Image (tube, rainbow, N blue to C red):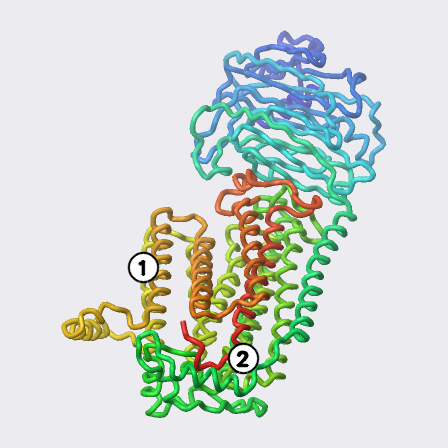
Amino acid sequence: MGAVSLTKFILFILGIPIQNSWQSIDGSNPEPGSMVNSYSLISKIIDGAYGEEYTYQVNNSIEYTIQYLNVSQWNPNQTARVSVESTSASKIFPVLIVVRQQKGILSWQLPLLVGTHSDHDKEYQKVSRTLCPSRYYALDGDNATPDEKETVIVSISSSSPIDVKFSVKVELIEDFFVQLSESKTISVSPNEPRFYGFNFPDNVNTALLLVDSEDDICTTVSIQTISCPVFDLERNVQFEGQWETMYTKGGITVMKESYPRGLYVVFVVKGDDWECTGKETTGSDSRNKSLTFVLQPGITEEYYIIATAASLVIFLLFYLLSGGVLIFHIFGNPQEPTVSGIISSTSNDIDAPDNFGEASTTSSYPRETEPSIAHSDSTLDEDDIDVMLDTEHDKDVFRTKPVLHVCDLARKNPRALQMKSQQYLWSVFTVGVFYALPVVQLVFTYQTVLRQTGNQDLCYYNFRCMHPFGSLSDANHVFSNIGYVLLGLLFIFITVHRERLHQKNGWVNRKLGIPQHFGLFYAMGAALMMEGVLSASYHVCPNHSNFQFDTSFMYVMSVLCMVKIYQTRHPDINARAYATFAALAGIVFIGMWGVLGPSTFFWIGFVTLHIITCLVLSAQIYYMKRWTIEIKAIRRVTVLWWSEFRHRPLQSITPRYPNRMVLLVLGNLCNWGLAACGIIYSFLDFASYLLAIFMANLILYLLFYIVMKLFSKEKILLQPSLYIFLSFAAWIASLFFFFHKAISWKLTPAQSRTYNQPCLIMDFFDNHDVWHFLSAASMFFSFMVLLTLDDDLIHTPRDIIPVF
């Protein structure tokens, strides 16, 4: 295409009719470099030199075409960059620039209009664009070679009726193709985008692009295949390859199989910071961003094997050590006391006065012989006895005593209680399966969309430590959840052994020790495994919409642990599985609401519900389920208290059950403090705040249980003491890594990347992976504490084991 054809093309764009006959103004033959049509449009052709700046004036009758023919100085690592500036161009009569190469055409106008979120376009009077390198033409499969000449033609025109001054400069860029591990510092602005080329060395299959900047200016980083045209404007940079928004940090992992011929790294500065911060740009209008980028080699397959194998070996040690502890427990188990010893201790307790100076009433009720569980009856229901009229009176007699012992709250059929406990396991499996299947489908759909669109903002990865494997973009964060699954399975194996040992020794048929119902332990192990599955699913594509998947079974585990602690000394009045999971369903719903749509009204409603729930549960726990919620309950309680206050003022203000009162007062104070924090600070991360409520209550309840156990002169044996120490140490270490986050889904994707950190262990695992490992160990040791904490009471009669 010659200069005449190019002029026709520009006139066609402007909508001006074109005549095919060309003539000079005076009717004679036109001179070279000065041709006109019937509209007196003069096209001046100039031979340009690289590095020289040319200044001319254009209007609706004159256009300039500058030819750059001297390409002998080019080498395969170079390309050209065109800069055009016009301070007098206007939006009504812009200056049009068309750059033509052998296999590509590039066009824009001055002033360049860059859109913003406020719909007020920013104008730039100067634009610099990089051209596709000549090396591309030698690699695209044609017969062209780097030595073949290529012409770069820059045409400038305008429809302005008056002269518009402009300047143009084309210069060569040295070292356009960056090398592996080569750091390069550049300056980018909305009107001066930049891109550089990169080719994978033969021995490198993965590369990690790292971008750093001290300027908090929103930028798009794009990875595109080596082809023309290159999409390097804000309006089209997302049309090709992988891309992400960046604030001060950025990173993209690229695979050689996706870019076999190499790639372009493209940097485009946004017109404002809305996409990076969600806020309008304030301060200086300058949008010049200085950044440094480098392409580092990714890890090899050997690192994948070493890191995963080392992790599995560590968890194998858990299995080996647990097996050793079980063997020691079998052969080192203390001998059971003689029958005479049991009778002696029991008779001494019957005659001993209680804390109130009154004779214990425990012996006034004959002990029932628990039926054998060898015969199983599926029709057995613990509620069958509750239809008897004397049942309610019987419950009042035993549950309202000033001093309670375990035998008072272990009167129901143990086989029925065991079946009730097993319902937790089946509820966990049922809820887990129906919850996990759509979750897995959803997150893999996210992963597919990410691969198809190249939108790296869709998933909140730690882009500085993410290792793809197969269809997974971030395999290391998915794999590190293996600890939850393996340790949950190990805890189930240990529980199976404990249950068999319990049945083998016949403890279930005697009124000795804490009543053992293992269904809740099985449910805790299964919940730990499901936490691993759902956490791994979340990390397939972590983002704001699916964070609840990572925390849902943490709620389940914390609630199950609290229920288990309460069941230990209150087996007859423990919560049912369906009621517990119904409450958990409400909790998950509230968590979802708090993540997706928190507001002032939501926080007020949640805090009110939180406090009311604490008060209702406190009443139920304090009165051992002998208190019913009625409209007239407050009036009835007030009348009774006033009547007692008039006759016995001191006793009316003294709690009848001091141990329970201490626990409930501490629990309510803790929850009121958490509620106040929620109102004052209005945490953005509601899911973590909700989890903190459950974990705080669990820790408080466990500490109270241990303190009361010691206060009651019970022992904590070596094995549970070791588990307490290990769980405490593991929790401290895991929380340290948890709070040193590598991402934050509460923020925008660009802001989240400012938390990105390099790998911490074996160039494969980061802080959050370590959190996964340590938190799995923490939960396992915590479960073992609950499993072994009352081993000192195995041979102790239940009528001398206090309830607290």
Give the distance between the C-alpha atoms of the residues marked 1 and 2, in whole angstroms: 45 Å
Q: Mark 1: few, some, or many residues within 10 Å (few <14, many ≥20)?
A: few
Q: Residue at x 52, y 91 (%)?
A: 371
Q: Give left or right: position of 645 versus 248.
A: left
Indicate the amino acid at tag 1: Thr
Q: Looking at the image, can residue 446 be seen? A: no
Indicate the amino acid at tag 2: His
What mark, if any, has residue 608 been given in the picture?
Answer: 1
Residue closest to the eye, 9 or 88: 88
Q: How many marks?
A: 2
What mark, if any, has residue 795 been given in the picture?
Answer: 2
Q: Give left or right: position of 550 versus 482.
A: left
Residue closest to the eye, 183 or 332: 332
Q: Position of residue 114 (x, y in %)?
A: 51, 29
Residue closest to the eye, 194 or 670: 670
Q: Residue at x 78, y 28 (%)?
A: 135
Q: Give left or right: position of 243 versus 589.
A: right
Q: Quadrant of the C terminus?
A: bottom left
Q: Position of residue 38 (x, y in %)?
A: 60, 17
Q: Secondary structure at mark 1?
A: helix
Q: Is 215 drawn above or below residue 27 in the view shown?
A: below
